[in-house]
Image: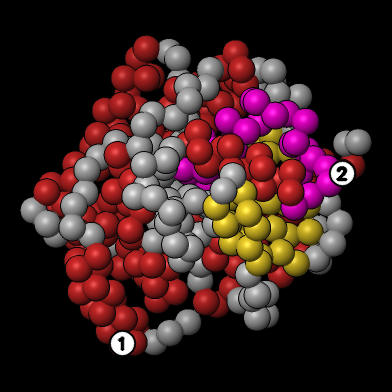
Amino acid sequence: MQSLIFGKLAHIAFETRIDEVLNSLAFILMGSFAIAYASSSYSGSMPMPKKISVNGIDLKYVEQGTGEPVVFVHGSNSDYRTWEPQRESISKHYRFIALSMRYFGDEPWLDNGEKFSVETHADDLVEFIRKTTSGPVHLVGWSYSGSVILTVAVRHPDLIKSLFLFEPSVPSIVEVPLAAKEIKEDRAAMVKDGLAAAKLGNNATAVRLFMDAANDKDGSFDALPEEAHTMMLENAKMLPLLLLAPPAPPLTCAQLKQLKFPVAILRGELARTFYKVIAVSMAECISGSQLTVVSKGRHLWPVADPQAFTEMLMKFLNSVEKAR
């Protein structure tokens, strides 16, 4: 872990740069969230990224290990590096694969971002799985990627062996009117301060407020390590696309009821109402799914305690194997 002084200097540097990168910010929140990794979680050097052509664009990914493929899909303001803390442990038992979705990471854009949507990312993920694996995969997701993964699962169940989702952002499955109203109001409250800062052109402040609010704890953004700040800055360009993206394909509880493979749903004990209600609703929709409440966990739990995240994932994967 970097020293406190160095971390503060790095924070000042990226804050200056991000204000130059982001010139405007608008809001359509899909419950997405920027996630990064902690340097203390490194247990080896990262493999050289590979590229693969998918639907006319190149996607970057890393892989390591052999065996059944476990595909990790990141959330907002991040890329394949989100899952670096999990790589070494997972690759000892499985084929670890982590990709950067279209408009994320450092790959050049072939357009101005007009194709950014859950629909596009789901189509890309389907093609990516087909081109990089020879059979069904275990999918791991978090926040924004929850919508992407579940869209793929509903449309192409033959590609899925199991799902492991932490606080997925899929508000359309909440069909009880009172609960739907509740998460809509909480989502609006979650972005209120960040949106106000963005309208004033204070984009670095907007990002900090947005992340603090999603984690429902002041100071969450500042507590992230230098590596997290760097990755978020490098992905800042996509933020306006996310917030202006068209609504995700509406997923219904009836559709989720048709899923027949193992599904693990996790949410933090201290999660915001938005994430908490969605997780509970999803577990009620998917028969036989596992709902785990992480003690004292918040939306940043996977990066706050990556070892615990990996242990829970491994426990789930092992249970899937034993149930066959």
Question: x, y percentage for residue 321?
Answer: 87, 44
Is 280 rendered above or below residue 165? above
> What is the span of residues highlighted in magenta in the rendered image?
132-161
* Residue at the image position 67 percent from the left and 74 percent from the top: 47
Q: Quadrant of residue 88?
A: bottom right
Q: Earlier in the sequence, mark 2 or mark 1?
A: 1
Amino acid found under the numbered disc labelled 1: Ile
209 sits left or right of 118 in the view:
left
Question: x, y percentage for residue 254?
Answer: 60, 13
17 sits left or right of 137 in the view:
left
Q: Quadrant of the C terminus?
A: top right
Question: x, y percentage for residue 20?
Answer: 20, 68
Per the rendering, the mark at residue 321 is 2
Dot 2 falls on a residue whose secondary structure is helix
* Residue at the image position 22 percent from the left and 43 percent from the top: 26
Per the image, the residue denoted by label 1 is: 5
